[in-house]
Amino acid sequence: MMMRFVNLLFQRGVLIAIVAVAWLLASSRVPSFVLPGPAKVWSALQMIAHSDSFLHDVGTTMGRVVSGFVLATLIGTPLGLALGSSKRLAVFFEPILAIFNTVSSAIWAIFAILWFGISDATTVFVVFMTAMPLILTNVWKGAQTVDHLYVGLAQSFRMSRLQILRKIYLPTILPYFFSGARLAFGFGWRVSLVAETLGSSDGIGYRLRQASDLVQSDQVFAWTALLIAMMLLLEAGVLKPLENRLFRWKTTAGAN
Amino acid sequence: MNAPASVLAAAAIGPAQTQQPPLQRDVIASAIAPAIALTQIGKHFDALEVLKDISFDVAPGEIVALLGRSGCGKSTLLNIIAGLLPPDRGSLRFHGQDASAYQGWRRIAYMFQEDRLLPWRTVRDNVMFGLESGRMRKSEQRKRADRALQLVDLEAFSSAWPHQLSGGMRSRVALARSLVIEPDILLMDEPFSKLDPHTRTHMHDELLRLHQITGLTIVFVTHDVEEAIVLADRVVVLEPRPGRIGEIVPLSPSLARPRHPTDIDVAEQVRILRLKG
């Protein structure tokens, strides 16, 4: 166990070293507006972190992503449940879902600008349109896997429909919902940047575009590094522990 | 037999503790009334007649087997008794009370062919599931679940997950989940048919032990003649198309307990009943 951990740490160290050396070598051969070196990016990073608008930009983007995501959950979950519990409803609405899944986020962004202009709603809308079908589809799939034997069990104890929904349906759907929500959040986060570069006047996406327009490559790289760090932190600090806690019953092996 | 005193006490006062109206309003009637009285029960599924003229009584504390081949309507009959299916014809009474009222008081436990343990709940939470349709406080639910687990000797596994248990243990958890509501009547639909023969014999002993402690009235469905004879006081033999009573075979007290499939008198009785089938 310990050995394996040390080994993994070593491998990661080597990988980082290789990337860093390659980056250094490459950046010394091309102009810095094409590929800025690590030192330049580091100083840009510090400059961004100390700028007045940094917290505002990060907070704004986060706020938009979270709003779009929460809206998608609030609307996608009941819709998925409805489709999952009625075959006729599912057959009827399936084409709409197919459309949702084929229209690219960039197109939603263009629609959003037409409808909402340069505003928060533009980004929220794009995140929503991307995340909602993912959550809906997963909840729907989950609802289809509900075991009718468990429903019969609940009925034999004379549970109400609401109790059956809470005690049988929701726990069955939860793993599906979770993987859908995770996907939705990841996608929502990425498309929010696209939306912000097109239709907003603040936020991380807007800063990225601004830096790019002014050919401040070091800042583009710095923002990118920040985004990656934030996503990794969210994954390791929130999502993974939450998943482990929620689905203990799947993973616990023999021990008692 | 060797259960702790608290468990014995709990089993003895069980019904009176439940949240629903007490039976006492008809003390005399219910004292002499059978635990279950079926009178001319009939059931159709569309044009198909599944049950015809089913009439028999089950005395309080009695163990009755519904024996028959598949398709004779024995599970349908059990579901009607449980209140999971309405009969088309005939009347059904419990301890002299109207069936639908009695079924609503949660005094009837039902055990399925499969254990139906919820994989996302620990053993104790699975047992508590039986109480969650009522209004009992969580702490009381937990106390009762622990008591029921003690009854089936699984208190050490209360925080284990179902997938960590053997088939026999899972079956005992399902039994505890049925007993946790402290029922008067236990209905079982081929509850041990998915277990291996050895475990099944063990579960038979377990069930009889619990029956002695609790004094439950038990009606169970089986297609296994030997199982019917080892467990039951009386065997109701059902015949198919339409499902009707072929014969009611009394076993107790003439056939002494404990019964083992290899005992001469038990084996003889099994042989007789098999020949009739």
Image (cartoon, helix red, strand yellow):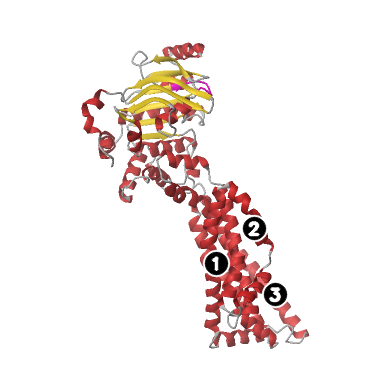
Residue B123 sits above or below residue A94 on the image: above
**Residue B206 seen in the current view:** no
In the figure, residue B252 lies in which quadrant? top left
Residue B216 is covered by the magenta coloring: no
Q: Give the class, few, some or many, for how many residues have Cα within 10 Å of label 1's Cα (few <14, many ≥20).
A: many
Residues behind callouts 2 and 3 on a single chain: yes
Left or right, B47 with reference to B259: right
Q: Earlier in the sequence, mark 2 or mark 3?
A: 3
Residue type pointed to by label 1: Phe
The structure residue drawn at horizontal position 49% and vertical position 49%, both measured from the top left corner, is A169
Q: Which of the chains bears the disc numbered 2?
A: A
- Foreground disc of the pair 1, 3: 1
In this figure, which residue is indicated by the disc labeled 3? Answer: A19
Q: CA distance from mark 2 to mark 1?
A: 20 Å
Instruction: Determine contact: label 2, label 3, CB under 8 Å.
Output: no
Q: Secondary structure at mark 1?
A: helix
Instruction: Magenta stretch: give its range.
Output: B66-72
Q: How many dots with numbers? A: 3
The image's mark for residue A96 is 2
In the figure, residue B229 lies in which quadrant? top left
- Foreground disc of the pair 2, 1: 2
In this figure, which residue is indicated by the disc labeled 1? Answer: A69
Q: CA distance from mark 2 to mark 3?
A: 44 Å
Q: CA distance from mark 1 to mark 3?
A: 34 Å
Left or right, B230 with reference to B147: right
